[in-house]
Image (spheres, grey):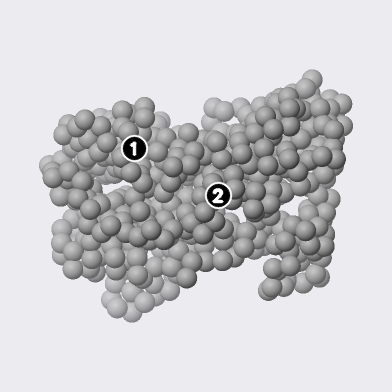
Amino acid sequence: MSGIFGVVSKESCAATLFYGVDYHSHLGTEYGGMAVLGDKFSRQIHSIAQSQFKSKFFDDYPRMKGNKGIGVISDCDEQPIYLNCKFGAFCLVMTGFIDNKKALREKMFKQGESFAEFRKDGINQAELVAKLISRGKDIVDGIRLMFSEIQGSCSLLLLTEEGVYAARDRWGYTPLVLGRKKDAYAFATESSSLPNLGFVVEKDLRPGEIVLVGEKGVVVKDPGKDQMQICAFLWIYTGFPTSDYEGVNAEMARERCGGALARQDKDIKPDYVTGVPDSGTAHAVGYSMESGLPYRRPLIKYTPGYGRSYTPPDQAQRDLIANMKLVPNKDIVEGQSIVVCDDSIVRGTQLKNFAVKKLWDAGAKEVHVRPACPPLMFPCRFCFSTRTTGELIARRAIREIEGKDVEDISAYFDHTSPKYKKMVEWIRKDMEVTTLRYQTIEDMVAAIGLPREKLCLYCWNGKQPA
């Protein structure tokens, strides 16, 4: 997913916007962008594929003059988009994934629409969203129209002369919070971006809620609804540890996940527990607290210059980052039985080749892997992450067991079923680990602490909201 940040202030907003956007850098690796409105729009977009957001924009933001602005760390599209239409000029940033974007593009082509931005698959999602909004009677009507047309998800910030419009995805897949301080308001994907900038969280926007912050303060244009399907993976992996989503802290949820994993383990006698840094760390801390095992660091992340290895769209780039960022400590590994907690196993390649193998090569006696969520069965339809079932190691295992691709895989959902156990054993052998035990979906939901019906669990069970 991408991360978006916006600010409306009585003073110049560029510095606050710069640092607020930078606090979302863990959410994307492709593009960064900022737009500020004063006497006119000022917009900058840079590739951040090989460099950090701060270094790219450090010389730009002092030249951006105005008291309101929006920005993005993008996982795939160049943003912000600028558009001038019948109800005026605006800039837009978004996070989410438009699952039917190709069908919408073809429909709009036939209606005479044109697109200026280009991507490898032919369309920039942010431009598509902007063009759909421009078809409304006004901005609010346009956002509602866009929501009704898209399949997938979209939360957005829209910068106009009036102020900043914020709209959260109609099912609330992605978070969006409103923060406030004395003379300014801010919108953010990550609540963790607010405290160091002096903001306190005023509220989480509701699914489908549309808000305008301008000269009159906060004006709710559409109250949204209670029905929600927020992404459970925010607490397992995606979100920043100090962020809260719907009142539930990510770090605390991860610790509870680790505790649940520890309660499953009665048949192994490891020397210590560790987490694959950084996203497995809190899960391992929870495991340690529950089990009484010491927490140690046999793999250390070399932080400068290496971000998340899951987010780049290119497999070779993911592998390079995964290999380079983890440095093994042989003195801590040799002869030891180690429980390794990680957030998940998606493709399986990084954990196997760049964590587990390094432990074996450093002389580990046993390696017991404990993912903090169940096997991922479906590619995400609501954020830009996995795109095909072929990428998922669980589906590869099922294909090998069945001898073909099967449409109905529900027999593999139940962690007590023989087919589930065969699948996990296949993955264990492929991963070349001593034991493998996944989190159950019940324990994961309990660790998050929200009602099951408010969570999007599509990656695990393939169920979408009605």
Q: Which image quadrant for residue 395?
A: bottom right
The residue nearer to you, when weighing 272 against 143, is: 272
- At x 49%, y 66%, the residue is 465
Q: Which image quadrant for residue 389?
A: bottom right
Element type at marker 1?
A: strand
Q: Callout 1 environment at 10 Å: few (<14), some (14 to 19), or many (20+)?
A: some
- At x 76%, y 47%, the residue is 437
Element type at marker 2?
A: helix
Residue type at mark 2 is Phe
The residue nearer to you, when weighing 316 against 100, is: 100
Q: Which residue is mark 2?
A: 233
Left or right for 322, reference 206: right
Please name which of the two marks, 1 or 2, marks the residue nearer to the observer. 1
Residue 316, given in percent of the width and then of the height, sits at 63, 47
- At x 23%, y 53%, the residue is 220
Can residue 204 be seen here?
yes
The residue nearer to you, when weighing 69 against 186, is: 186
Relative to residue 24, is residue 147 depicted above or below? below
Q: Which residue is mark 1?
A: 201
Can residue 423 be seen here?
no
Residue 235, given in percent of the width and then of the height, sits at 54, 44
Number of callouts: 2
The residue nearer to you, when weighing 80 against 211, is: 211
Left or right for 213, reference 393: left
- Mark 1 and mark 2: span between their CA atoms? 22 Å
Left or right for 243, reference 136: right
Q: Earlier in the sequence, mark 1 or mark 2?
A: 1
Residue 71, given in percent of the width and then of the height, sits at 33, 43
